[in-house]
C-alpha cells in the first residue's frame, strides 16, 4: 500500500517529528505537574504555551517555505526542537523549562510547516499524510509504554521528542534546497485560492482540535484520579488507543478517496464526540479504555481526510499549513481549557460540553468537504478533455510518442 516509489520517507519522518509533541501532550503535562512545583492548571498552561508556539511557527512560515528552502527550514526547526526540548528535559528551574518548551514548540511547528507544504505538492497528499500519522502514532505508543518504567521526573517525554528530532535531522539531506511546489501561473503565486472554504475549514479545525485536546490534556488525570488507575495502566491504555489508531489510519489509507471526504469527516467527528463523552465520564478501567481507544482510533482517520481536504485547496500547500496551524491553536488552548472546565464543572460535564461542540462544528466541516468534491471532479474532467484535444494533432508528427509523453507528465 505504501510503496517506496510513491511515498517520500524524509517527509514522513519530518511529519512524525513535528507532530510528536501534541501526541505526547498528556504525559508531558502530567509529568510537569508531578515533577515540578506546578499545579495542574499551571502545567496545562505550559502545555498550551508549547502548542501555541508551534502554531505561531506555522502562521509565520505558511508562505515562506519556498523562499527559504525546505531543507534549510527543516534543519532549523529540528535544531530548535533538539535544543529546546533537550534543554527543558535537563533543566529543573521552572523558567528554564518553560523557555525550552517554547523554543522546542516553535521548532516542532517549523518542521510541521515544511512537511505540510511538501506533502500538499505530492500526487496523493492523503497517502503521505496517513503514512505520517502511522509513524507518529507508533512512536507515541512506544513512548507511552516506556516512560512509566523510566522513573519519575518531567524530562523523559521531552527527551523523547528531542531525540526524535536528532534522529530525523540526517534525513533532511534528501529534501530539496529550493521550493517544493512551483506555481505554474502568476495567479497561483498570488492570492490564496478558495478563501471561503479555507477560512471556514481553518475556523472549524481550531474548534475541532480545541474540543479533542481539552480531553487529551486531562485524560491522564481522568484515569489516575476519577478511574483510580495506575500510571502504568493509563499509559498502556493510551498505547493501545494509539495502536488502534494505527489500524484505523491503515484502513483510511487503503480506502483513500473511495468514500469521499464528507462521510469520514462528518460521521467520524460525531463518533469521536461519543467517545469523548464516554471517556470523560469513566470511573473504571473498562469505560475509560473503551472511550479512549474509540476516539484515539477515529481521530487520526478524520485528521488525515481534513489534511487532504486542506491540501486540495491550494497546490502550494499554504492552506494545508494555515489549517494545520489553526488546528495547533485549538490544540494549544486544549490543556488549559480542559483543566479549567474540569476544575469548575467536573470531568463528566466537561466531556458533555466538548461532545456537543464537536457535533456543531461537524456540520460546516462536512459542508466544505461536499462543496469541494464536485469542483475537483469538474477540474479533472476538464484536464482530461484538454489532453485529448492536444494529443490528437500531435499524432501527425514523427515525434509524437515522445512529445505526448512529456506533455502528459508535465500536466
Image (spheres, grey):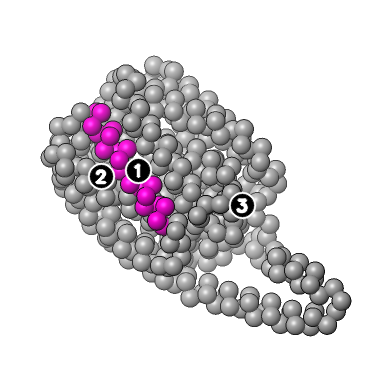
Tell me the magenta residue range. Answer: 231-252
Q: Estimate the spatial distance between the alpha carbons at disc 1 and disc 2, rounded to whole Å.
A: 12 Å
Which numbered marker is on residue 292? 2
* Residue nearer the viewer, 266 or 52: 266
Q: Nearer the viewer, residue 52 or 270?
A: 270
Residue pointed to by mark 3: 5
Q: Which residue is mark 1?
A: 243
Between the residue at mark 3 and the residue at mark 2, the CA separation in whole angstroms equals 35 Å
In the rendered image, the residue lying farthest to the left is: 283
- Secondary structure, mark 1, is helix
At 49% from the left edge and 28% from the top edge, which residue is drawn? 162
| One can see residue 389 in this view | yes
The earlier-in-sequence mark between 1 and 3 is 3
Circle 2: element type: helix
Q: Are marks 1 and 3 in contact (CB under 8 Å)?
A: no
Q: Secondary structure at mark 3?
A: loop
Whether residue 99 can be seen here: no
Disc assigned to residue 385: none
Circle nearer the viewer, 1 or 2: 1
Q: Is residue 157 magenta?
A: no
x%, y% of residue 295? 29, 50
Q: Residue at x 45, y 56 (%)?
A: 253
**Total marks placed:** 3
Q: Position of residue 144 (x, y in %)?
A: 34, 32
| Residue at 87% from the left image edge and 76% from the top image edge | 398
Residue 302: image location, x then y, percent: 38, 56
Is residue 40 rendered to the left or right of residue 314?
A: left
Residue 143 as seen in the image, left or right of residue 181: left
Amino acid at each position: 500500500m505504501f510503496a517506496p516509489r510513491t511515498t517520500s520517507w524524509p517527509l514522513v519522518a519530518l511529519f512524525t517529528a513535528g507532530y510528536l509533541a501534541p501526541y505526547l501532550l498528556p504525559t508531558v503535562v502530567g509529568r510537569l505537574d508531578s515533577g515540578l512545583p506546578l499545579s495542574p492548571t499551571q502545567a496545562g498552561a505550559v502545555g498550551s504555551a508549547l502548542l501555541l508556539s508551534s502554531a505561531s511557527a506555522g502562521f509565520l512560515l505558511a508562505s515562506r517555505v519556498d523562499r527559504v528552502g525546505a531543507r534549510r527550514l527543516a534543519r532549523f526547526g529540528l535544531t530548535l526542537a533538539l535544543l529546546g526540548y533537550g534543554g527543558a528535559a535537563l533543566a529543573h528551574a521552572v523558567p528554564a523549562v518553560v523557555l525550552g518548551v517554547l523554543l522546542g514548540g516553535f521548532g516542532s511547528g517549523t518542521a510541521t510547516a515544511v512537511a505540510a507544504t511538501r506533502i500538499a505538492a505530492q500526487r496523493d497528499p492523503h497517502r503521505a499524510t496517513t503514512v505520517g500519522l502511522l509513524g507518529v502514532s507508533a512512536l507515541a505508543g512506544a513512548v507511552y509504554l516506556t516512560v512509566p518504567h523510566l522513573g519519575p521526573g518531567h524530562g523523559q517525554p521531552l527527551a523523547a521528542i528531542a531525540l526524535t528530532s536528532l534522529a530525523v535531522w540526517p534525513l533532511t539531506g534528501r529534501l530539496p534546497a529550493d521550493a517544493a511546489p512551483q506555481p505554474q501561473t502568476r495567479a497561483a503565486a498570488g492570492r490564496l485560492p478558495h478563501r471561503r472554504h479555507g477560512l471556514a475549514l481553518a475556523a472549524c479545525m481550531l474548534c475541532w482540535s480545541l474540543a479533542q485536546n481539552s480531553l487529551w490534556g486531562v485524560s491522564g488525570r481522568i484515569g489516575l484520579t476519577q478511574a483510580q488507575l495506575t500510571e502504568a495502566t493509563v499509559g498502556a491504555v493510551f498505547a493501545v488507543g494509539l495502536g488502534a489508531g494505527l489500524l484505523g489510519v491503515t484502513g483510511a489509507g487503503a480506502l483513500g478517496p473511495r468514500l469521499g471526504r464528507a462521510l469520514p469527516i462528518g460521521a467520524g467527528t460525531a463518533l469521536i464526540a461519543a467517545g469523548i463523552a464516554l471517556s470523560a465520564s469513566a470511573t473504571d478501567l473498562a469505560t475509560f479504555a473503551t472511550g479512549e481507544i474509540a476516539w484515539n482510533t477515529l481521530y487520526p482517520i478524520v485528521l488525515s481526510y481534513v489534511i487532504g481536504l486542506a491540501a486540495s485547496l491550494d497546490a502550494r500547500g499554504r492552506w494545508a499549513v494555515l489549517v494545520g496551524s489553526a488546528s495547533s491553536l485549538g490544540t494549544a488552548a486544549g490543556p488549559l481549557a480542559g483543566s479549567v472546565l474540569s476544575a469548575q464543572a467536573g470531568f463528566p460535564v466537561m466531556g458533555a460540553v466538548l461532545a456537543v461542540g464537536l457535533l456543531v462544528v461537524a456540520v460546516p466541516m462536512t459542508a466544505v468537504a461536499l462543496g469541494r468534491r464536485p469542483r475537483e471532479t469538474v477540474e479533472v474532467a476538464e484536464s482530461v478533455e484538454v489532453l485529448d484535444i492536444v494529443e490528437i494533432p500531435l499524432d501527425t508528427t514523427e515525434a509524437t510518442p515522445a512529445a505526448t509523453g512529456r506533455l502528459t507528465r508535465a500536466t
